[in-house]
Image (tube, grey):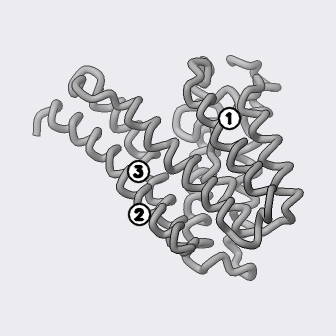
């Protein structure tokens, strides 16, 4: 297989995320939350794999007819933002009445602006501001089921954090602590799939794994920023 064919195959792999997004949305409409999150986890795995492959096969040079970054952003908005926000709004026990409307408006509007922000990456390929990973946030909310005031506060804080000069790690590209960050990200993915598989059983150890890995992934970039400087 030529390098051009391999580069094209990477674009095709990225595009499968749209299929998984549709399957997740169909599950969400039927309120099959565990199935929805399982599809979103599959989409997250694809998103984690296609980036390194795109750089390895230099898709910009070898398959220039398709804009891989644009394709990735479209799918990320669906799987990271749109579908999780819908699930948060639709679930009958999380955000009652007006609180659900506030959450989906804030999440979708702020995320649209963030995804279009040309300053979203720092020099070391970390994210500048919370990178709109609402799929991860909402999955943890489904697992822990905190009160609606806690959920609203979390949505508000993270929406504001999208536009603050705070670093958040990219699990693959941020070089500092990569030997810890990458296993943490893989661990989060494993625990997320486990939690969804057991239908968010509160007795599952997956919940503790989600808490530990989520705290690390949310806070590691800020700690690195204090240690190495914003662009260090």
The answer to whether 69 is drawn above or below residue 206 in the figure is above
Residue underneath mark 1? 110
Q: Residue at 78% x, 69% y: name it.
A: 145
Kindly report the distance in space between the C-alpha atoms of the residues bearing marks 2 and 1. 25 Å
The answer to whether 107 is drawn above or below residue 114 in the figure is below
Q: Residue at 68% x, 43% y: name it.
A: 107
User: Would you identify the image quadrant in which residue 53 lies?
Assistant: top left
Element marked by disc 2: helix
Query: Residue 211: image x %, image y %?
Result: 75, 60
Front-most of residues 174 and 122: 122
Q: Residue at 61% x, 57% y: name it.
A: 86
**Residue farthest left in this picture:** 1
Among the two numbered marks 3 and 2 on one chain, the one whose residue lies closer to the N terminus: 2
Among the two numbered marks 2 and 1 on one chain, the one whose residue lies closer to the N terminus: 2
Kindly report the distance in space between the C-alpha atoms of the residues bearing marks 1 and 3. 24 Å
Q: Which mark is residue 148?
A: none
């Amino acid at each position: 297989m030529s390098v051009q064919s391999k580069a094209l195959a990477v674009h095709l792999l990225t595009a499968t995320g749209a299929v998984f997004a549709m399957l997740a949305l169909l599950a969400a409409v039927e309120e099959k939350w565990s199935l929805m999150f399982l599809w979103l986890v599959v989409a997250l795995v694809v998103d984690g794999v296609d980036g390194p492959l795109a750089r390895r096969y230099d898709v910009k040079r070898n398959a220039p007819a398709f804009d891989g970054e644009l394709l990735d952003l479209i799918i990320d908005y669906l799987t990271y933002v749109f579908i999780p926000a819908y699930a948060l709004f639709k679930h009958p026990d999380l955000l009652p009445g007006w609180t659900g409307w506030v959450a989906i408006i804030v999440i979708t509007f702020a995320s649209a602006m963030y995804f279009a922000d040309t300053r979203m990456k720092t020099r070391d390929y970390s994210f500048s501001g919370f990178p709109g990973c609402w799929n991860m946030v909402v999955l943890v909310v489904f697992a822990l089921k905190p009160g609606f005031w806690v959920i609203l506060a979390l949505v508000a804080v993270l929406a504001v954090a999208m536009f603050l000069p705070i670093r958040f790690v990219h699990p693959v590209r941020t070089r500092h602590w990569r030997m810890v960050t990458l296993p943490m990200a893989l661990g989060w993915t494993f625990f997320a799939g486990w939690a969804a598989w057991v239908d968010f059983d509160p007795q599952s150890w997956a919940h503790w794994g989600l808490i530990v890995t989520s705290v690390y992934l949310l806070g590691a970039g800020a700690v690195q920023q204090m240690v190495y400087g914003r662009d260090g």
